[in-house]
Image (spheres, rainbow, N blue to C red):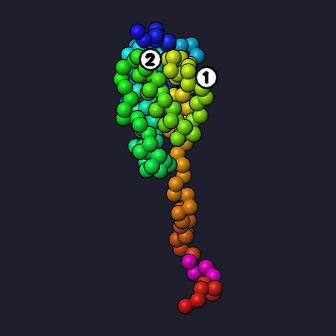
Amino acid sequence: SPPATMALEVTSETYKWLTDLGVIIRNPNTKVSEDNKYTIDKSSAVLFENAVNVGKIIKKIAIESEFSTLSEEDKKELKLDSLKEVNTPAARLFNWKHAIEGLKKLDIAIDNDTKSLLVAGDGDMIADVLEQLHLKSLTKPNLDAPKRITPVPSGNLGSLDVSAISA
């Protein structure tokens, strides 16, 4: 049987982000700790423990976002549609393996010790991954920077030196 669910607490910013993404539903009864951490309810927490919701977030950031910097080949390599919604040890291992591949593509490195804790359902480690994903989602690459053209101020065009322009 699955391990006892550990409390999954995230910052208020990450909680709001998760609800904005539609990964969890805002719950008025959500417990908030003295240090402003929100406890994710047990039924939602299970979908983070077995990496299903983590996979959904990676998919939103890495594949569906207009700001994704992944190549089409990298996107195809992500096997996030095959995650299993059950919370058995085998399903968690399978799901986290694929989620960690997705995290790597987003430059979030997970070492073997952390992987073991994630697969075991460690709430603090899962919360840390969620915080890192939240930060990634805020960092939008400036894809149009080189193409940006500085507009010429209107008026005063008569004072521009056009002598260097050949006919």
Q: Quadrant of residue 19?
A: top left
Q: Nearer the viewer, residue 91 or 9?
A: 91
Q: Amino acid at mark 2?
A: Pro
- Identified at 54% across, 28% down, the residue is 129
**Which residue has dot 2 on it?**
89
Mark 1 is surrounded, within 10 Å at the Cα level, by few (under 14), some (14 to 19) or many (20 or more) other residues, namely few
- Identified at 50% across, 36% down, the residue is 101
- Identified at 53% across, 62% down, the residue is 148
| Magenta residue span | 157-161
Q: Nearer the viewer, residue 126 or 30?
A: 126
Q: Is residue 16 above or below residue 76?
A: above
- Residue 158, magenta (yes or no): yes
Query: Which structural element holds mark 1?
Result: helix
**Which residue has dot 1 on it?**
113
Horizontal placement of 106 versus 43: left or right? Answer: right
Q: How many marks?
A: 2
Majority secondary structure of the magenta segment? helix
What x and y, as percent, mark residue 61? 46, 40
Q: Can residue 123 be seen in this snapshot?
A: no
- Residue 79, magenta (yes or no): no
Q: Is residue 13 above or below residue 152?
A: above
What x and y, as percent, mark residue 4? 46, 8
Q: Can residue 63 be seen in this snapshot?
A: yes
Whole-angstrom CA distance, mark 2 to mark 1, is: 16 Å
Q: Quadrant of the C terminus?
A: bottom right
Q: Is residue 144 above or below residue 14?
A: below
